[in-house]
Image (tube, rainbow, N blue to C red):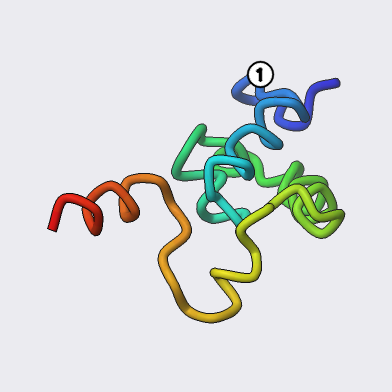
């Protein structure tokens, strides 16, 4: 099912980006542009994220980096 008609982003794609660490609609937008054109999908994205699609939400709530790129940078340091 499409979440973002403007960019053809599906619910599965949003869930994958969430699994990769995108825990907010803004982070989803950065990952795939969903929500950046007409904005009608932002509430749907919020609903998907609110149902626990973000397995790293605890890290985000603690202020720790949750995106894969940040973790890779920390491991390299």
Rendered location of residue 42, percent (x, y):
72, 50
* 46 left or right of 74 in image: right
Q: Nearer the viewer, residue 44 or 23?
A: 23
What element does badge 1 sit on?
loop
Vertical side of 52 occupied by 30: above or below: above
Q: Could you tell me which residue is drawn at 73 percent across and 24 percent down? A: 10
* 5 left or right of 37 in image: right
Q: Could you tell me which residue is drawn at 13 percent across and 58 percent down? A: 77
Rendered location of residue 38, percent (x, y):
65, 40
Q: Could you tell me which residue is drawn at 66 percent across and 24 percent down? A: 9
Q: Could you tell me which residue is drawn at 16 percent across and 50 percent down? A: 76
Vertical side of 63 occupied by 30: above or below: above
* 71 left or right of 39 in image: left
Quadrant in the picture for the N terminus: top right
The residue beneath circle 1 is 8
The single residue placed furthest to the left in the displayed view is 77
Vertical side of 17 occupied by 10: above or below: above
Q: Nearer the viewer, residue 39 or 55?
A: 55
Q: Quadrant of residue 40 in the image?
A: top right
Rendered location of residue 24, percent (x, y):
61, 58
Q: Nearer the viewer, residue 72 or 26?
A: 72
Q: How many marks?
A: 1
- Neighbor class of circle 1 (other Cα within 10 Å; few <14, some 14-19, many 20+) is some
* 8 left or right of 75 in image: right
Rendered location of residue 65, percent (x, y):
41, 65
Q: Nearer the viewer, residue 12 or 38?
A: 12
The single residue placed furthest to the bottom in the displayed view is 62
């Amino acid at each position: 099912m499409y979440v973002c008609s403007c960019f053809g982003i599906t619910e599965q794609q949003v869930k994958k980006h969430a699994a990769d660490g995108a825990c907010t609609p803004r982070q989803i937008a950065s990952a795939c542009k969903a929500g950046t054109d007409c904005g009608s999908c932002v509430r749907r994205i919020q609903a998907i994220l609110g149902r626990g699609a973000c397995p790293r939400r605890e890290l985000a709530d603690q202020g720790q980096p949750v995106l894969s790129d940040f973790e890779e940078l920390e491991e390299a340091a």
